[in-house]
Every structure is written in structure tokens, then in C-alpha cells.
Amino acid sequence: MLPVLPISKCVIACLCCDHRKLHPNIFIIHFHPPLTPCFLFLPFLARQSDYAPYFYDNGPSSKHGNMALRSISEDTPVGTQIYILNGTDPEGDPVRYGLTFEMGSKEYFRVDSKSGNVTLIQELDREKLDEISMLVSITDGRNKVVEKVRVFVTDANDEPPEFQNLPFIIDIPEDTAPGSSIFRVQAADRDMGSGGSVSYYLQTSPFAKFTIDGNSGILRVKPGETLDYETTPTHFVTVVAKDGGGKYKGRQQVLTSTATMTINVLDAQDMPPSFIGTPYFGYVYEVSVPGSEIFTVYAKDGDQGKPNTIQYSIMNGSDGVFDMNSTSGCITLSIYPTLLRNELYEIIVKASEVGTKDQQLDYDVTTVTVRVVDLNNHPPTFYGQNGPQSNFEVTMYEHPPSGEILRGFKITVNDSDQGANAKFKLRLVGPSRVLRVVPQTVLNEAQVTIIVEDSSGIDYEKGTTLSFKLLAVEIDTPERFSATADIVINLLDTNDNIPKFTAEYYIARVPENSIGGSSVVSVTANDPDSGPWGEVKYTIYGSGSDLFAIDPSSGLISTQPWTSLDAEVRSKYNFYVKAEDSEGKDSLSEVFVTVLDMNDHSPAFDEKLLEKTMIIGIPVRVEAVDEDAESPNNVIEYSIMTADPDNAFDINADTGEINLKPYITSMEIVQNITKQKDCKWSLVVQARDRGSPSFSTTAVVNIDITEAQTSLKGPMADFLLKSRDNPMKALGMVTIVISLLVGVTALISAGMYMRNLKSNRIMPTRRIIKRRPRDQQPWIFNMPVVQFSNPADKFLFVNQERSPRPKPPPPSAPPPPCITRPYERPRAVPTISGVLASKGSKKAKSNRRKEGNISSALVAELKKKLEQKMIESNQSYY
């Protein structure tokens, strides 16, 4: 049964009176007059009238709402507020917000439950996660609404291109045509948009033989360029992949990656074979038999990468008396020597390349000269360009490359015998494995070729001349004839060495105050090269090197002529020395210079006559300063030379504190010692340093002996006792007190002024002006002034009177009652000063006196302004 309420108790419209319903669970029944009044039927269930809160749905482009479909850039910094959850409750109750993630997933955001501010707490990476799902909630404490929303992570250009299928190793034939495509480079960029597009280019080189298409990454042989295995068998090309650029953290950036491609050129069959060791000479001896070896030729394929097999054959000139092994190239005799018709045969020999299918390809032709001999009656003989020669000499540069032929030698070796009598071996005798001779076995005659085997052995610095013995010794003959030739190689130097210092660093110690131009240290660097290359020039540079000079030839380092090193100014120097040859090859070493402190300063007191005041039981101190840089030259010992009276004082040798003897404990004892009331004693104090030789100085110290007074007690007495040797400290304290009083007065005056200004503005007709009686004295503020007169009355409080200022013109109101303190009689404060106040020079003391005068003037000026402020405040108050 629904409750029925009078319509007058509710504010709800009537359905039949052309009104609208305000709530889905509320309706009314209305009877028009003169019938009964309208009644309202209202479901009275609390649970049905409590509505859940809800989020505002402002769309993905808004920064307020339920965060659905919101987009966030991946380069957003951690800690950035990215969104505000916003919703409401129909009943107007306060709402709280929440944000949760699925279990096991990373939490990227955090929300403030009251304000709804959402903050990024983890770095975003679109390439790893481009969409984040989470649950946002809103609650009014009773009802909670949870919505699942998605947040999209947008791209930023933070990923460089990445090459695919690394490493890049490419094999191409050397006969590849110019402009041919040989490889395709592929790189991927995980970014989107322009940041994900990739273009390519090659790092430029003056000898580049390749080009790349910027869009497709296709690598080609550059038009007009050819490859040559014999010249460059391998090419290294650096390719750069560049993205299209994009924004990252508010700035435009372009990212690149590089990779090195190894391009191996495969040898192609484009070079014919060639005979080695030509010209060829062979001999037939009278003792030879059919099948005897006459000569063996040797040819090799010009394509060294993948050489073909060589096949040998005789083309012409053998007249049917010589045969040739097609594989080894060995020429043999096919008949007995007695059947030979000629003494000299010119045999045309062919060396052909054989392909994989046994087809003959390129070939080379040479001539083998065969002579017919009979007796072994001639030893081997070496020939030069002008005939027989036993000494051969050549001049060359050091360190030729290994495998190089020494073309300066024109040596031919010949044995005029025939057949086996003319067969001999060649070998070099000298430094092992430096050179080798080709051929090693000769039949009758051969051109001698000397080849470099070990380049390091041909070193000018090890020797300017290399000597070898070239031996030709017959083999297979009873006589064993031989020949010897001297091989001399004169070496020319090259600049293959750099200057080297004899030490990694040099340490020098120099006494201070050495005259300018004094030697410091000598450095040495050696360059084994000869001539200008071996001449070393020295220079120095670095911090502190401007105070030193170096002889460019000898390496002697000395101080500049105008330099005087002072350990008190700087005691350590270090700089670099460079040794350089004529072509700029150099090396470095470091020099450390220590300036040795000399005892060249005497201790010094501020003044020769020191005035001190000593309170019995409290020491006074004297101090001297030694300007030497190091201990013990600047360590000072104090002693008393003489004293009047004698045996009355002790002095601390380390600190300079002067004390009375322990038995002197009162002024009566002091007066008994001096037999007079004058208690001013003198002593001569010596300050001596501990250097060698030791220096000393003396000062006369006049000490006024007094006894501590008890008339002044409390914190002020303690302060004055501590400030007895520093009157400026007391003056500074008084200045601070006066400044505080001026500030307080200014604040009071400002407050009174503001109050009067407010009163005048609100009630101008009720302002009461009181006139000040003419006989009223102005308010004068007296401040205690610290005076410093003599050591006996160093601290004396005096109330200074100031003449009254003129009375302000009427109308004026009488000032408030002011209690002026009666002038007090000055009280003398016991003198307690006796410490030497400063270690500085006379100039410093003069500066302190100037500062004291300035401070006194400042105090007077502040007092004057304070009194003026008080008068002005009185006038404004009334």
C-alpha cells in the first residue's frame, strides 16, 4: 500500500494538469476542485531513491571525464598529470575515484581519489604496448560504478632503424657489369608514420665503387666502375639507414643506424697464365741418355683467387728430339746426343689453362733455348750487364714489402758445360730468412731473382749495409765446381720511427729564488732515423709552462730569464714536453717540478713595541708571522730574552702566550716586587723559526698589570671581557642594538599612521585635535655610547645629552607621558685587554682604524634618524 500525501506537502507537478513527472518512481493522482485535494502516491523505499554516481562522458579529446579512448604519447614524462576523472552523484554526495589494472599487468597510472587527477607512473613504449586497459571507478560511499576503459599509446620517434639479416657479407665476381644490382639492404623501423619510413645512403669515400638506391636499399656497382680482384679483393662499405624523422619529447629528431658490408670480390678468369723465371736455358750433354731432364718450365694462372690447372706442350722447334711432360712442364731428351743434328735448339713452349670441362682457355708462349754440350770443364759464372762479375751492389729503401723482387740486380748465372755438368744450385749465405734466391736449381744458365722474405730484417737502424754471398755449386758432378758473388745492399733510411723519451716522466727539484735561466732538468728523446728525420725538436706546453723554457735542440729545461720561482706563491708545477721530428711525428712526456722552500723570511711582529694589559690569572698573547711556505721554515718558537723585573713571566714556546709566574696571584705581590704602585712591566720576546739557517726577530712588550674587578657582572661583563682586545666587536654590537630600536620605532610609527589615516577617512567630523602645552618638553631618546679613551678606561658607559630640538609649530597635542631616566654616574669597567688583536700588516691596522671611524659615524647618524622618527611619530599621532 503506497502512502498518500497531500499535494501541498510535495513540490511535484500534476499529470492531468499538463505538468510533467519529475522522478520515474513518483507519480500523483490529482482530482480537480470541487473534489478532494490532490494526493501524491510516493514509493517510500530508501534504496530506490539513492542513485549511483556516474562519469561525465566528454569524448576522447577531452581531458575530463572517464578517460575512455584517451590517447597518450609514448614520450610523456613520468609524473605528468595526463587526465582528470570527473563525475557526479545525483544526490550531490561527494564522490571518490579509483583506478585499477588487471592482475599481473603493469600499472601505468595512479589517480588521486579526491581530485581525480591521473598521473603517469611508468614509462610508455608503444612498440611494446600500444593499448592499455584498466578499470576506473566512481563511488559516493554507498554505490560504486566501475567502467572498463582503453587508453591508446601514440607513437613518438624513439626507435632507430634496425638492419635485418646482419652481418652483410656479399660475394660477387670481379667481372660484374657496372650498374648491376648485387644486394638489397633491408632495415625496419618500429615507429609509425614518417618516423617509421627508412631511407638509405652510403658513407662517402673518394674510392667508392658502389652506390645504393635510397628508397629500395638495392646496392649496385657504380656506373663507370669495375672490380679487380688482383687490386682489391675485399671492399668494406658502410651503409646508413635513416628514418623520416619525427617528434620526440617536443623536439624534431631524425634517427640513424649504420652497418658495414663486407664485399668479397671473386676472382674471374680474366688473366692469362704467365711463365716464371724466363728466359729458359737447357743443355744436352754428351753423356745424356734418352729421357734425361733438359729443363722444367713453370707457369701460373694470373687469376690467383681460383687458378686453373696449367697444361704444357711444345708448339715448335723440337725437331722430334725433345718431349715435354704436359703436367710438370719438364722437357726431356728423346734420343741419344750422338743423333742430334744441331748444337742449339729453340723450342717454343705453350702453357694453357684447362677449364673444368678440360677445355683449353687462355695460354702463354715462351722459348726454351737448349744447347748441346759434352764435358764438365767450366765452373758456374755470374754475369752482369757488362760481362762476368763477382760483386753486385744495389741501393734501396729500408723495409720493402715481403715478396718484392729486388729489381736493381741484373744477375745471370751460367755454366758453359752441357747436360748434367751444367746443373748447379743457387743459395744465399747471410742473415737468415731475409732474402731468398730464385731459381734454386739451374741447368746451364738462368736469370737470378732475389726476393724479399722478411722485411723487418732490412732495417736501416740495424745496419746501413747488408752483405750476402751468392753461391752457385754444381751438383751430380765429381768436380763440384762452384762460384761466389758478393751481394751488397746499401740501405736508404725512411722516417719509420718516432722520437721516444728515455723516461715516461721527469721529476725536478728547484730551490726557490733561483736566478732566471737556471737549469731545471734535461730531457732526452731518441729517434733512430737518420738525417732530418732523426733530428728531434723539443717544445713544452701546459699549465705553468710559461715560467719555463726549453732548448729545442738539447732538451734542457730552464726557468725563464725573467722568472723567479717562489715556493710561497706556488710550489708545484707540471707540464708536458713534446719531442717532434721534421715530419711531425712526436711523443710526449710529463715534467714535474717541485720548488724547494728556502728559509728566506724572518718571523715578524706587527710592531716592535707592543702594549698589553694583563689581568692577573689571564694570559696575554704575542704573535709573529713567518711567510715561508713549508715546515720547519715557518714554525715559530717564542722565548723571553730579557724581562724587567726578571723571573716574573713565563711564555709558551709554541703559542706565544705570556703568563705571570705561578706565585704572582695578586696586585699586592706585584707591588711588592716593583716597590711602587706603577704596575707596568717590560720584557723582550724573541720569535725564532726552525729553518736552517734560523732567523729570529724581537719585540718589546710593555704589560700593564691589573686585577679583575667585580663591579661589572652578568652577561655584559662576560661580553666585555671577551671583547677586551677587539673594541670593534663591542661597537658592532651597539650598532646592531640601535638598528633594532630604529626598526621597532619605524614599525610603531607606520601602525599609528595607518590608524590615523583610517580614522580620518571614516569619521572626519569627529576628529579631535588636542594641542600640546607650550611648556611640554620634547621626547628625547638617550642611548648609551661606548667610548674608547685609554687602556685604563677602555669601556665606559656615558649618557650623552643632546640639545633639544625646536618645538613643532602649533597646533600640536601634548605627547604621552614619558619617563626619562635620571643620568647615572659613569661607572668604570675594569681594563682586561691584553691580546694582540691582529696578525696583519700596518696597512691592515690602518684599514681597521678607518672602519672604526666609519662605524662611529654610522652610529651617530642612526641615532639622529631615530630621534627624528620619534618626533615625526608624535606629530602624526596628535
Image: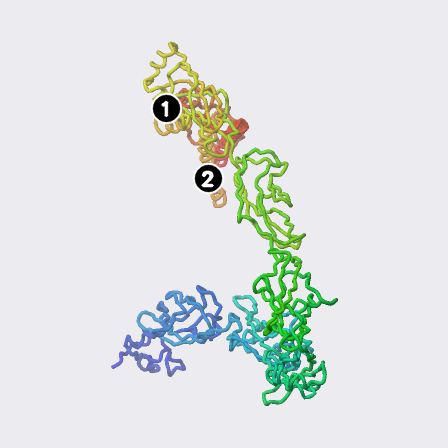
Task: Kindly identify the residue that appears in the image at 66 percent across and 55 percent down.
Answer: 583
What label sits on residue 561 in the rendered view? none
Tell me the quarter of the picture where residue 148 sits.
bottom left
Q: Nearer the viewer, residue 870 or 415?
A: 415
Q: Residue at the spot x=59%, y=49% of the render? A: 525
Of the pair 398 and 421, the residue shown nearer to us: 421
Q: Which residue is mark 2?
A: 747
Which quadrant: the N terminus?
Answer: bottom left
Q: Which of pointers 2 and 1 lies earlier in the amino acid sequence? A: 1
Count of picture labels: 2
* Mark 1 Cα shell of 10 Å, populated few (<14), some (14-19), many (≥20): some
Which residue type carries mark 2?
Answer: Leu
Q: Is residue 299 above or below residue 624?
A: below
- Left or right of 695, for residue 585: right
- Could you say where residue 3 lies in the image, as x and y percent from the top left? 26, 78
Q: Tell me, yes or no, if residue 215 can be seen here.
A: no
Residue type pointed to by label 1: Ile
Q: Nearer the viewer, residue 539 or 71?
A: 539
Q: Position of residue 179 (x, y in %)?
A: 66, 81
Q: Nearer the viewer, residue 284 or 79?
A: 284
Marks 2 and 1 close (CB-CB < 8 Å) = no
Task: Look at the picture and state if 227 lies above or below 540.
Answer: below
Q: CA distance from mark 2 to mark 1?
A: 45 Å
| Residue linked to disc 1 | 618
Give coordinates of residue 170: x percent, y percent: 56, 78
Direction from residue 58 to residue 324 in the image, left or right: right
